Image (spheres, helix red, strand yellow):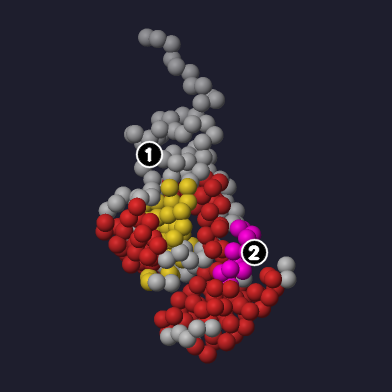
Amino acid sequence: MGNPVVPNPSIPPLYFLPPGVVPPDAGALPLSGVTVLLVEDSRFASDALRLMCHRSGARLRRAATMAQARAHLQMYHPDVVIIDLGLPDGRGDMLIRDITLARQGSVVLGLSADPGGRSLALAAGAVGFLEKPLAGLGAFQRAVMRHLPGRFAPTLAQDGKAAPGDLLALHDDLAHAADLMSLPSDDSARRYLAGFVAGVARSAGDVDLAHAARAAALAEDALPQLRQMVGQRLAAYLSV
């Protein structure tokens, strides 16, 4: 018998890797080469995901509406599609259903500031769900990588609160909300508006604004208070 092979402690063991999975090159980012389509109407929330994709090595494209997303998907097939459940031209779970039924091979994840959206997204065919605000870079990487075949990362980023810090994007989201409030609307439009503001507020860590948005979603007479709070925040950001 030959001499026993002594493992080199500087080389990580590979025996636990599934068949067909190869470790990345040293120093490679865990989502290197992955293309992500984000369907999200909030610029502020999109900025957080843009930073996470950049730090993970993924390429990100964004669509703000279902119509834009469908146009993207006619031209190319991304590896991952992340879909917000509240979109200006329809329900995101309907888009999730359509993509999964088409069986184009993309990993589809739902996204919402409402934890209750998880069951809606999974029922529509999504394989996972991301709750806004995102828990951190490591949580984002794990949520994506667990559904990508052949992906292995020995070390993922430590979790931490994601803070995009883009006041211009936040201002644009609030200005968009203020514009919507100035237009005549029905109950459906009011609920979309309230959901949009609630998502932006949660991403920004604005608890009071999130509470006001949830109240406006339930009752029309709470809309003036939400309008006032959005105006106050717009004025505050303009003075920064």
Name the element at disc 1: loop
Query: Which residue is drawn at the image coordinates 57% and 78% (left, top)?
Result: 178
Residue under numbered circle 2: 167
Q: As drawn, which residue projects farthest toward the top?
A: 1
- Is residue 169 magenta-colored? yes
- Marks 2/1: CA–CA distance: 38 Å
Query: How many numbered discs?
Result: 2
In this rendering, the answer to whether 163 lies above or below 85 is above
Residue under numbered circle 1: 150
Residue 27 in picture, x, y percent from top left: 54, 34
Q: Which mark is residue 105?
A: none
Residue 159 in picture, x, y percent from top left: 57, 51
Query: Which residue is drawn at the image coordinates 73% and 71% (left, top)?
Result: 239
Range of magenta residues: 163-174
- What is the quadrant of residue 135 in the picture? bottom right
Query: Which residue is drawn at the image coordinates 43% and 47% (left, top)?
Result: 35
